[in-house]
Amino acid sequence: MALLIDRKGRRYLLTLKEGGAFHTHMGYLEHAGIIGRQEGEWFYTNSGHRFLGLKPTLSDYVLEMDRVTQVIYPKDIGAILMMGDVFPGARVVEGGFGSGALTLAMLRVIGAEGSLTSYEIRKGQADKALRNIRPLMPPGAALTIKEADIYEGIQERAVDRVTLDVPEPWRVVASASEALAPGGVFLSFLPTALQVHRLTEELNAQGCFQLIETAELMLRPWHVTEQSLRPVHRMVAHTGFITTARRCLPRPVGRPKANPEEVS
């Protein structure tokens, strides 16, 4: 896998293979001239146009890869990993495999000691997404894809995290409360405020979720040159809301009764 960047900053993601070639309006470059070379080298097409060659970062790959569905942007993936406290060795259940971008990021974090079970009802889509992310999957990744509807229930128990990228996550709240270990994190990514409101109402009604919080992130790049320092004209603004909650015992009702021995 290689990432080529031209003089205008345009990026091209390549799967290198013997006999292959990268064709562009600026000429072509044979894959054989890239394979085996070190990162950070410069490559030239047959017409003399220059490209910088690097291995793609996870962020590069997510933005440039073929998309089966709309992907979660890198800015949100980073926040999800932190706000969801996804950690090495974690047992995670995911609802909505999608294009696999978040799946790939979580697999990198949980490592070979952890496990990730992804519910995806559309088998054909899951197969395409799996082929899409397999080149960057870490060795020994413990990924299980279940062709099942997560709205009908989560079968796993004592999991550390439940992450959802589905349209109606409130339908998963009850089963998530049974699947999560005490203190486990429930996390949902949603595009609209009305969906967040509906989800929050359900989390509150369930009674065993506390610290219910919602946030969104804005990413504003800056243009920095010798003569200029200013924000760019376009930014990655709203892409979605991240809602988190912790699995706890239900909140006690009323005041605690006094200990008779302390009273006396």
Image: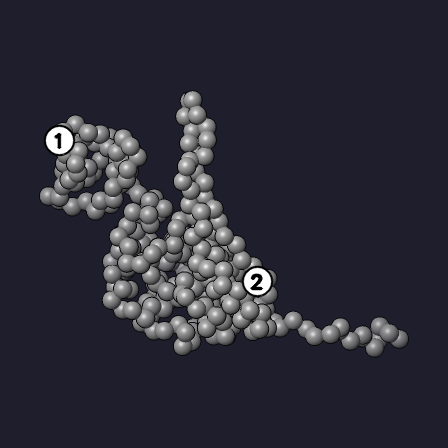
Left/right of residue 145 with respect to residue 91 in the rendered view: left
- Residue type indicated by callout 2: Ile
Q: Looking at the image, is mark 1 or mark 2 earlier in the sequence?
A: 1
Residue 164 seen from this side: yes
Residue lying furthest left in this view?
19
The residue positioned 57% from the left and 73% from the top of the image is 205
Q: Where is residue 247 in the image (x, y as percent from the top left)?
A: 55, 68
Quarter holding residue 146: bottom left
Quarter holding residue 37: top left
Residue 155 seen from this side: no
The residue positioned 36% from the left and 73% from the top of the image is 149
**Secondary structure found at label 1:** loop
Q: Mark 1 points at which residue?
A: 46
**Secondary structure found at label 2:** strand
The residue positioned 25% from the left and 41% from the top of the image is 12
Front residue of 182/220: it is 220
Q: Quadrant of the N terminus?
A: top left
Q: Name the residue under label 2.
A: 212
- Determine the CA span between mark 1 and mark 2: 57 Å
Tag on residue 205? none
Q: Position of residue 224 (x, y in %)?
A: 42, 29
Residue lying furthest top in this view?
227
The residue positioned 24% from the left and 66% from the top of the image is 124
